[in-house]
Amino acid sequence: MKRKGILAAVIVILMLVTAACSNSGTDSNKPDDSVKTGNTVKETNKEEEAQPNATPAEPVTITIAFPWGEEIFNSRFKPIEEKLENVTIKRVDAAGTNEALQELFATGAEPDIIIGNHGFKPLFDLDVVEPLDELMKINQFDESILDPSLVAYLRAQDPEGRLMGFPDGQGGQVLFYNKEIFDLFGVPYPDPDKSMTWDELLSLAAKMTAERDGKKYVGLEFGWGSMDSDATVALNELALNKTDPDTGEVLITKDPGFTKYFDWMKKFYSIPGIVGEHTKGKSLFSMKQAAMSVNWNGILTGDWGDKEFKKNMDIAPVPVWADAPEKGPIVGTSPMVVTTFSKHKNEAFKVLAEYMSDENQTNILKDMASGPAVSNPDIRKTYGTNVEAYADKNISAFFKVWPAMPEKHFSGWDQYVDIGASLAAFAESDKDVATFLRKLKEESETKIKEAMAAAK
């Protein structure tokens, strides 16, 4: 009986050793609970995490192709490196263009992450984008953490609706206004909490486009000169495809949204003195000669223009269409993509997940290094709070409306319908909207046919 008892004990011990060995292997495609990412990756296996003798994760170097220099890179990614104990994050300098990336690859470099500051096209052309849906599932990443408009933008890049990257942040537009000029013309300031409609903005702009004391003023400008892509904000709120993504058919004469936008621009350009040689390529707003500017929300961070103009500025929400008062301009982002050839896809994803943590996003947003990539309203409120130029400004205006979301897959042929580049000719033309759109359509069709022929 005693020998039987000893034999049974030996068998039990062998079974326990075998089970332990079967669980000791590592798989880089499984969630690693040694990595904590604030609210981004859900914690699992806490009992295993608490074991003092747990095998540490294998050291890994994640290389990021980053276009904005070492200082910005370190501010964004070195705190992440400190959080992920087994991960070293290395920068290689590369813009997100086709040519720059090919030159990088020719050196033998294989970045795990690329920051696509020139959009998705170069990344798709080089076939380097790894969809993130499976990695999100493996790591139990909660997608609702991300700004939904940015998620929609990223998914619209893919015909299958896969998430093709994480957002590095966003830029948005708001209405800046000069209190001095409003006072000069005796016009009440815009509502700080409610968007004007585009038609209301037009009426206000006309009142302040005039000469006072020998100085010419314009009531409104878009960006620099109001005759390029900066002036497409109202169109971007409609979130329209210019072409059919499958056939390349040009849609600008079919979809009434384009006529709606050009009708409004026709009225804008018809205000005497609103555009001309005196406005081309200039920021009259920074020269204190424009009452209002629809512009990038970070415009006041720039070290340019009359420094005094910043003191008399304030901010109102971006104007909206009367029939869609809840929709702001569609937003884009510089996508952060995991590469198809990365040998450490899971660890690369963990870096991106930590980028979205509350702590990291707060650090980025306070200094206005980028717009918010996350949906958390408390985090979004920290935007620009460390930037002196925005002290006492109505920063809440940035988030009064949510960006419009694309309703379908983006069309790669849209790049050949350059509405922004057409606006200078439109501003100086006496053509009606229908005629101008037909001409633009014909020009775009020629470009698309040439591109299709070259691709064969």
Image (cartoon, grey):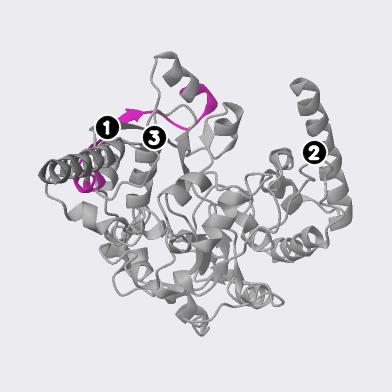
Q: CA distance from mark 2 to mark 3?
A: 31 Å
Local SS, label 1: strand
Q: Residue at x 34, y 67 (%)?
A: 379
The percent coordinates of residue 48 (x first, y second) are: 23, 52
Residue kind at label 3, given as amino acid type:
Pro
Which mark is drawn over residue 380?
none
Please identify, in this view, whether the residue under mark 2 or under mark 1 is nearer the observer.
1
Viewer-nearest residue: 366 or 425: 366
Which residue range is magenta in the image?
79-100
Residue kind at label 2, given as amino acid type:
Ser
Q: CA distance from mark 2 to mark 1?
A: 48 Å
Residue carrying label 3:
67
Residue carrying label 1:
60
The percent coordinates of residue 348 (x first, y second) are: 37, 39
Residue carrying label 2:
444
- Please rate how many residues cluster around mark 2, counting C-alpha atoms within 10 Å: few if below 14, some from 14 to 19, many from 20: many
Local SS, label 3: loop
Viewer-nearest residue: 455 or 52: 52
- Please rate how many residues cluster around mark 1, counting C-alpha atoms within 10 Å: few if below 14, some from 14 to 19, many from 20: some
Please identify, in this view, whether the residue under mark 1 or under mark 3 is nearer the observer.
1
